[in-house]
Every structure is written in structure tokens, then in C-alpha cells.
């Protein structure tokens, strides 16, 4: 039997009285006065503001370092002029909601240029009608040293709100069900007035669900993680350091070419190096390959051979050269040159082969040593690893709508740290882009060679880690690709330039 203890509502915390609304500039806004003008330098650019007058300039300078009660700004003309200025630049102004004693409850920091919170009013939100948290909102602890507060973020919000007190986090948690702010405040042990002001702040900053048709309504067709990944891996909707910022210089960059694993014994199997003259003379023309490429989901009776696999891997994915970085430079690293392009030439993608039916290769798992152009058999350490190998192949069969009995499954893995050592925010997006580049390269080379390629869009991270012998947070599967022999009969001819252009032009008149 489940016993539920009914708890009396805790007494509302904090001194009585209306909460205060304090304003301050983002800490990274530089205010450079020049007579009656000021120049504002901030993460989104630089602006010159003319003819503010010395008193307003002085108050603006004060706002860079200390909080100002928003209410006091309407009391005199200089204050009003400052308020108008802040309303022109809402993305530079942090809004603090504080108790009557000035102790902060929540701080809204603009993180995007689209931030529009009116400087004068974090409130104005729904006071008595029930409100509910957006399904895109999430709480977390920032990793920065000393950041012991909880923040609420959302890919839909142009603000990050710091929740300074556990009771405020409890208030947010109470809004996971539709509740009037006063009721959520009571559940969190906060005064009703504070609840109403917090709801107003959360509403104005984009953390409460908005009805369909309202500005900022929930985009129905996005999953939480997709929208978050999208908004954080491109610029414009966050203020985190992004791009090649080398945030992990305290950690050595991973080697350009990975070493052997304890699961690998012996030198491995040297793959034949294709003969340049034969390949160049025998390949179909580029356009024939591009237009003749298709996904193949049925194989010939004779399986693909180890020689063909060797040629495919060499032409699509080998390491052409490693260009040594400058050991004196903290941001230099060894560049990996491969047949396909990759941002930063980090060479983080690796290939593993799960072989079921291949002439010249025993069934099992192999790592492609792309620098030595060699296959390294990976022994399973227990029956569960072998079972994971079958799980991988079953997942591939399922991904093809149960149509393909794989001959060879290529698993693309990412040594993610190679990328994240250099790139922040965009590293995972970049590795997925590289997967796409590698897929197309495999497709084109396989087509030119008369093999059957098929990219897959899903795979099992844990099964791959077990089958291939990987620690998934260090090197994880990010792509799957099937390769087999073409079915007997004449090779499919390129379809030529038959396409919809002519018809769609006719349809459009
Ligand atoms: C990233 C990506 C993921 C794919 N995922 C699958 C998949 O999971 N299963 C499958 O049978 N085909 C998959 N395909 C193949 C597509 O279905 C195929 O490219 C599409 O139907 C167009 O046909 P075509 O490749 O013959 O031109 C994928 C292709 C790509 C590029």
C-alpha cells in the first residue's frame, strides 16, 4: 500500500511586501563615454548612442556595475531617457527579481539579440489564471566554477534565468502542471506576490507554454532534444563560446591516428592498395557515377570480396597523410588528410566492419586502420560481445525495413574528443556533417566500383560499443552503412538527366 503523507503548506518565506525589479547591464557590455555620446561594445557588436547628456551617461555607467531599481527610472527625465535607451537595447539588460529586502530570487540574462524583455516590467504576466512550463524548458547547473545556482534554459527562450534560491526552483517545478502562480508559490513556500512576479518573469522571458497562434507558441513538430541541439549548435540563440575556441587546452589533444586496442592481437590483415592507373582507366565518368548512384538493398549470390572492400576503404576513407602540428603552439594539432573533406581536418571518424559474408574474410568484427590500410580483427571478450554483434546486424536489417541480410556492415564511429578539444557547441553537429560527407563518398566510390551501397539512418549505440569494444563516451557510433555485391545481371545504367524540372516548369506556367 502506498502511504501519502499530506504535508501542511510551509509558511511563505522572506519579508512581506512587493518584490523588486532591478536592472543592470550584462557584465560583458563595455560603456565608453565620449562627451554626451556613449559607445556600447557587447557580444553582438558595437553601437554609438548620441546626445544622451552627462547625467544619463553617468547613470548608464553606474548600471554597468550595480543594480538599479527599475521603478526609480521613471521618477526624473534623465531616468526616463535611460529607460528609453534600455528599451532600445533589451538584449544588453539583465533583469533581477528580488525580495523586498533586495535579496535576488531570479535573474534573467539575455542570451540572444532577439531578447525583448521591456526594461521597465518583468511582471505583467498572467497572475491568476493557470500557467504551465514550456515542454522545452529545463533546469541545470552551469559547469562554471562558483556557479552554484540553478539555471532555467529553453531553446525557445532568448534568456537564461538564474534561480538563486531552492524555493524558486521549487516554484518552477510546481509549474510542470498547470497552476495559478499563487498556488505554485504556496507549494514552493513563497508569498503569492513573489509567485505572480516570477510567473510574469518566466512568461516574458519565454519559459511558459504559449497557446497555438500566440507569438512564441510551441513548435509542435520539434522534439525537445532536436530543437535544443539545433539552437545551441548554431549561432544566434545562445551566448556560449562557440566555434574553434580550444576550450580543452588543459587536456592533451587525442592522437591523429588511434592506437591498437587490447582486443586486437597481431599485425592484422594488410589490404591491397588499388592500382591508380587501373582505377582511373576503369572508373565510369563522374556524372555517370553521380546519376547512377542508388541505394541497393538486394545482393548477388557471390558476396563482396576482401579485395573490393580494401579498394572501397582505400578510395573513400584512408588517411592520405598526417601533417604534424607545431608542438610549441597550444592550439596546433596533427591534421588528418583523407579523401573526404572535414571541418578542422581532425580526422575523428573511424570505420569498423561487421562481416557476415565476405570472400576472403572470416565473419566477425574488424577495425579499419586507415593509416596502415589494414584490418585489425577485434576479438570478443565474452559471449555478450558476440551477442551484441548480432544485435548490430539485426538493427541494420530492421533499418532496411527487414529487407537486407547484411554481407558487411560498416559502423562509423567518432572519436569525439578530437573535435571537442577545438570546437565548442558545434562539435557534435560537425561530426554528423562529416558522417554525411563520408556516406556520400562511400556511395560514389561503391557505385563506381559496381558494389551495392546503402546508408542507414539509425543504429544502436550500446550494442555497437559492446560489439566493437569501445567506451561510448570516448568513441561512439554515429553512422551505419551497408555494403554488398550487386545482384547478377547487367549493372543498372545511369538514368540520365530525366527529372522533374521540365514538368514543374510547365506546371508553374
Ligand atoms: C543519412 C541517410 C540515412 C538513410 N537511412 C536509411 C535507412 O535507415 N534504411 C534504408 O533502407 N535506407 C536508408 N537510406 C537510404 C535512403 O532511403 C535512400 O537514399 C533514398 O530512398 C533515396 O534513394 P537512392 O539512394 O536510391 O537515391 C539512408 C540514406 C541516407 C543518406
Image (spheres, rainbow, N blue to C red):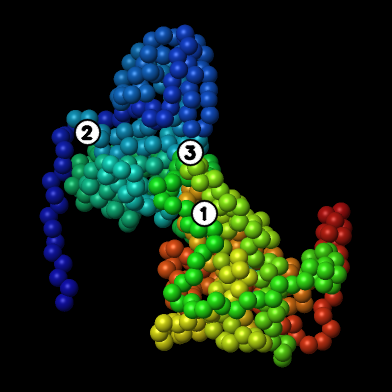
**Quarter of the image where one finds residue 160:** top left
Q: Residue at x 79, y 68 (%)?
A: 276
Residue at the extreme bottom: 301
Would you name the residue on which mark 1 appears? 419
Q: Residue at x 62, y 85 (%)?
A: 361
Front residue of 493 and 16? 493
Q: Is mark 2 within 8 Å of ligand 1?
A: no
Q: Quadrant of the N terminus?
A: bottom left
**Quarter of the image where one finds residue 368:** bottom right
Would you name the residue on which mark 2 appears? 103
Q: What is the spatial separation of the Cα atoms under label 3 and label 1, in whole angstroms?
A: 25 Å
- Please state the horizontal and vertical placement of residue 41, each as a whole percent of the image: 48, 25
Q: Of the residues under marks 2 and 1, which one precedes in the sequence?
A: 2
Task: Report helix, strand or loop for mark 2.
Answer: loop
Q: Residue at x 82, y 78 (%)?
A: 492
**Quarter of the image where one finds residue 409:** bottom right
Q: Residues within 10 Å of mark 3 (few under 14, many from 20)?
A: many
Per the rendering, the mark at residue 111 is none
- Please state the horizontal and vertical placement of residue 470, each as a whole percent of the image: 45, 71
Relative to residue 446, is residue 148 depicted above or below? above
Q: Of the residues under marks 3 and 1, which one precedes in the sequence?
A: 3
Ligand 1: which quarter?
Answer: bottom right
Q: Residues within 10 Å of mark 1 (few under 14, many from 20)?
A: many
Relative to residue 301, is residue 423 depicted above or below? above
Q: Residue at x 60, y 65 (%)?
A: 371
Per the rendering, the mark at residue 112 is 3
Relative to residue 46, is residue 302 depicted above or below? below
* Nearest to viewer (mark 3 / mark 1): 1
- Please state the horizontal and vertical placement of residue 136, each as a whole percent of the image: 43, 53
Q: What is the spatial separation of the Cα atoms under label 2 and label 1, in whole angstroms?
A: 42 Å
Amino acid at each position: 500500500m502506498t502511504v501519502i503523507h499530506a504535508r501542511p503548506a510551509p509558511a511563505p518565506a522572506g519579508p512581506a511586501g512587493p518584490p523588486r525589479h532591478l536592472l543592470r547591464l550584462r557584465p560583458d557590455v563595455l560603456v565608453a563615454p565620449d562627451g554626451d555620446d556613449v559607445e556600447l561594445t557587447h557580444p553582438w557588436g558595437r553601437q554609438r548612442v548620441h546626445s544622451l547628456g552627462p547625467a544619463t551617461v553617468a547613470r548608464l555607467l553606474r548600471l554597468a556595475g550595480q543594480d538599479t531599481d527599475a521603478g526609480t527610472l521613471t521618477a526624473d527625465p534623465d531616468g526616463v531617457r535611460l529607460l528609453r535607451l534600455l528599451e532600445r537595447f533589451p538584449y544588453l539588460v539583465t533583469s533581477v527579481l528580488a525580495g523586498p529586502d533586495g535579496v535576488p530570487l531570479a535573474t534573467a540574462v539575455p542570451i540572444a539579440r532577439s531578447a525583448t524583455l521591456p526594461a521597465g516590467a518583468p511582471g505583467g504576466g498572467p497572475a491568476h489564471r493557470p500557467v504551465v512550463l514550456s515542454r522545452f524548458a529545463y533546469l541545470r547547473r552551469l559547469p562554471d566554477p562558483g556557479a552554484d545556482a540553478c539555471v532555467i534554459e529553453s531553446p525557445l527562450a532568448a534568456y537564461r534565468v538564474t534561480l538563486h534560491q531552492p524555493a524558486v526552483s521549487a516554484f518552477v517545478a510546481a509549474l510542470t502542471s498547470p497552476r495559478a502562480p499563487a498556488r505554485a508559490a504556496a507549494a514552493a513556500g513563497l508569498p503569492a506576490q513573489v509567485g505572480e512576479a516570477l510567473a510574469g518573469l518566466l512568461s516574458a522571458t519565454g519559459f511558459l507554454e504559449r497557446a497555438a497562434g500566440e507569438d512564441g507558441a510551441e513548435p509542435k513538430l520539434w522534439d525537445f532534444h532536436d530543437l535544443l541541439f539545433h539552437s545551441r549548435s548554431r549561432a544566434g540563440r545562445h551566448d556560449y563560446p562557440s566555434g574553434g575556441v580550444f576550450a580543452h587546452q588543459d587536456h592533451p589533444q587525442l592522437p591523429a591516428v588511434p592506437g591498437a586496442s587490447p582486443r586486437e592481437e597481431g599485425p592484422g590483415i594488410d589490404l591491397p592498395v588499388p592500382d591508380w592507373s587501373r582505377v582511373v582507366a576503369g572508373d565510369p565518368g563522374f556524372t555517370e557515377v553521380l546519376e547512377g548512384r542508388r541505394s541497393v538493398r538486394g545482393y548477388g549470390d557471390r558476396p563482396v570480396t576482401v579485395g573490393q572492400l580494401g579498394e572501397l576503404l582505400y578510395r573513400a576513407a584512408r588517411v592520405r597523410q598526417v601533417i604534424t602540428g607545431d608542438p610549441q603552439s597550444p592550439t596546433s594539432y596533427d591534421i588528418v588528410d583523407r579523401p573526404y573533406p572535414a571541418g578542422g581536418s581532425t580526422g575523428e571518424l573511424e570505420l569498423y566492419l561487421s562481416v557476415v559474408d565476405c570472400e576472403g574474410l572470416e565473419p566477425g568484427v574488424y577495425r579499419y586502420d586507415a593509416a596502415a590500410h589494414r584490418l585489425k580483427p577485434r576479438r570478443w571478450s565474452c559471449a555478450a560481445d558476440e551477442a551484441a554483434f548480432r544485435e548490430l546486424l539485426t538493427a541494420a536489417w530492421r533499418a532496411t525495413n527487414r529487407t537486407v541480410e547484411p554481407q558487411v556492415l560498416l559502423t562509423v564511429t567518432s572519436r569525439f574528443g578530437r573535435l571537442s578539444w577545438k570546437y565548442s557547441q558545434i562539435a557534435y553537429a560537425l561530426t554528423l556533417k562529416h558522417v554525411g560527407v563520408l556516406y556520400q563518398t562511400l556511395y560514389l566510390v561503391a557505385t563506381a566500383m559496381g558494389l551495392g551501397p546503402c546508408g542507414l539512418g539509425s543504429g544502436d549505440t550500446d550494442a555497437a560499443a559492446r560489439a566493437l569494444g569501445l567506451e561510448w563516451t570516448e568513441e561512439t557510433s554515429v553512422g551505419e552503412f551497408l555494403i554488398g555485391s550487386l545482384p547478377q545481371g547487367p549493372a543498372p545504367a545511369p538514368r540520365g538527366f530525366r527529372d522533374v524540372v521540365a514538368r514543374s516548369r510547365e506546371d508553374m506556367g
